[in-house]
Amino acid sequence: MKIRFRFARGPAWTSRLIEWFGGGLYSHVDVFLANGMLIGARSDSIPKGTPAGVQIRPPDYLKGQASKILSLEVSSAEAGSFYSFLLLQKGKPYDRIAILGFATGRDWRSKDSWFCSELVAAALEEAGIAPHLAFTPNKISPNGLALILSALGAQVD
């Protein structure tokens, strides 16, 4: 079974800040659900009417933004645990302190609010797809997550 991830690059100053501190080209990541919708954590309400935080959004909500799709082959059990974890986080707030955490330090495993890439990394750990990450505890950037996925065998779609 494949899990598909969409990495995107946005035009906002916060996106550029995330790219700079994350050392790469991407500032956001979502995960495709089986129905083609995306789940992820955002600081803004895109599309209109969808609140910020962990939400399910349509696949075209980031029209015009540069993106890359990675896919990772996993077992059915791992995929079930991964998606269950993500869906249980729906409605939790965006971690607004996370952007500052890129520079100042913070615990990215806090489950009360999420930044997009830390949400996905936590789901990977929770499902046993990735081992407990021995990674700088104050950040998991979208670009760092892409490297983790690459190390796990993810392929560009």
Image (spheres, grey):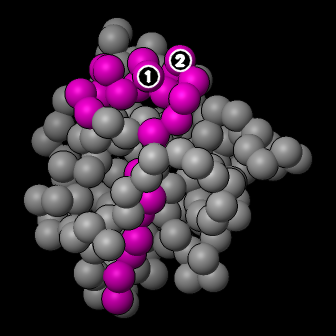
As drawn, 130 above or below 45: below
Q: Nearer the viewer, residue 9 or 56?
A: 9
Q: Is residue 86 visible?
A: yes
As drawn, 8 above or below 131: above
As drawn, 1 above or below 118: below
Disc 1 is placed on an element classified as helix
**Quarter of the image where the C terminus is located:** bottom left
Q: Position of residue 18 (x, y in %)?
A: 40, 25
State the residue position of label 1: 16
Residue at 63%, 82% in the rendered image = 35
State the residue position of label 2: 13
Q: Residue furthest right?
A: 49
Q: Nearer the viewer, residue 44 or 88?
A: 44
Left or right placement of residue 94 versus residue 24 in this view: right
Q: Residue furthest top?
A: 104
Q: Is residue 88 visible?
A: no
**Residue 68 occupies quadrant:** bottom left
Residue at 14%, 69% in the rendered image = 153
Residue at 44%, 22% in the rendered image = 16
**Residue 19 occupies quadrant:** top left
Residue stretch rendered in magenta on the structure: 1-24
Q: Nearer the viewer, residue 83 or 57?
A: 57
Q: Position of residue 20 (x, y in %)?
A: 32, 20
Circles 1 and 2: CB distance less than 8 Å?
A: yes
- Check disc 2 and give the amino acid type: Trp
- Check disc 1 and give the amino acid type: Arg
